[in-house]
Image (cartoon, rainbow, N blue to C red):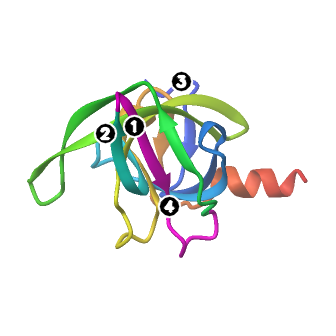
């Protein structure tokens, strides 16, 4: 059912307020179930997960080491068929001027063009993907300013 779903393109920009990241490039991937964000230096210390999001090469890099008291370990099947165990944290994403909850797996995506991948788990029941379009939410916000 397509009622009340928002059309989103294959790429966009979004804010992740809890992660202190604004206007970061995202890739919409209907082939991926989970959403993922690029980070480094992931470690668990006394039941708390620590990670540094992005890296020095990225314009949104702020160097802050974030901590997560609530997290889980989940298995993710990559496009080549291998299964990896990854940490998954809860965050929020602002897109189309609306704030949504989102689960993000923490993964080193330095070889990928987009630091954030948005998968079906988040997209389902909210969005319809049109692969011919790009940056719809971002362009709408720029036109209103």
**Numbered disc 2: secondary structure:** strand
Residue 91 position within the rendered picture, expressed as x and y whole percent measured from the top left: 53, 33
> At x 43% / y 43%, what residue is drawn?
50
- Residue found at the far right of this picture: 145
Q: Earlier in the sequence, mark 4 or mark 1?
A: 1
- The N terminus: image quadrant: top left
Query: Mark 4 touching mark 1, by CB under 8 A?
Result: no
> At x 48% / y 28%, what residue is drawn?
2
Q: Earlier in the sequence, mark 3 or mark 2?
A: 3
Gap between marks 4 and 3 measured at Cα: 36 Å
Which SS does the magenta portion mostly show?
loop
Give the answer, above or below, for where 14 lies relative to 34.
Answer: below
Q: Nearer the viewer, residue 83 or 65?
A: 65
Q: Nearer the viewer, residue 94 or 20?
A: 20
Few, some or many residues within 10 Å of mark 1 (<14, 14–19, 20+): some
Query: Which residue carries the number 1 mark?
Result: 49
Gap between marks 1 and 3 measured at Cα: 39 Å
Query: Mark 1 touching mark 2, by CB under 8 A?
Result: yes
Query: Which residue carries the number 3 mark?
Result: 3
Gap between marks 4 and 2 measured at Cα: 15 Å
Few, some or many residues within 10 Å of mark 2 (<14, 14–19, 20+): many
Give the answer, above or below, for where 75 lies relative to 59.
Answer: above
Query: Mark 4 touching mark 3, by CB under 8 A?
Result: no
Residue range in magenta is 46-60
Give the answer, above or below, for where 1 lies relative to 22.
Answer: above
Q: Nearer the viewer, residue 9 or 29?
A: 29
Query: Which residue carries the number 2 mark?
Result: 87
Residue 85 falls left or right of residue 71: left
* Foreground tag (4 vs 3): 4
């Amino acid at each position: 059912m397509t009622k009340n779903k928002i059309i989103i393109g294959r790429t966009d920009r979004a804010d992740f307020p809890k992660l202190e990241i604004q206007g970061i490039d995202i890739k919409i991937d209907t082939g991926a179930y989970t959403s993922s964000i690029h980070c480094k230096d992931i470690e668990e210390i006394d039941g708390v997960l620590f990670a540094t999001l992005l890296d020095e090469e990225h314009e949104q890099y702020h160097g802050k080491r974030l901590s997560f008291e609530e997290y889980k370990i989940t298995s993710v099947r990559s496009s080549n068929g291998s299964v990896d165990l990854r940490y998954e944290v809860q965050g929020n994403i602002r897109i189309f001027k609306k704030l949504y909850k989102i689960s993000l797996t923490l993964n080193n995506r330095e070889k990928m063009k987009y630091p954030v991948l948005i998968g079906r788990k988040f997209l389902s029941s909210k969005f319809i993907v049109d692969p011919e379009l790009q940056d719809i939410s971002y362009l709408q916000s720029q036109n209103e300013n």
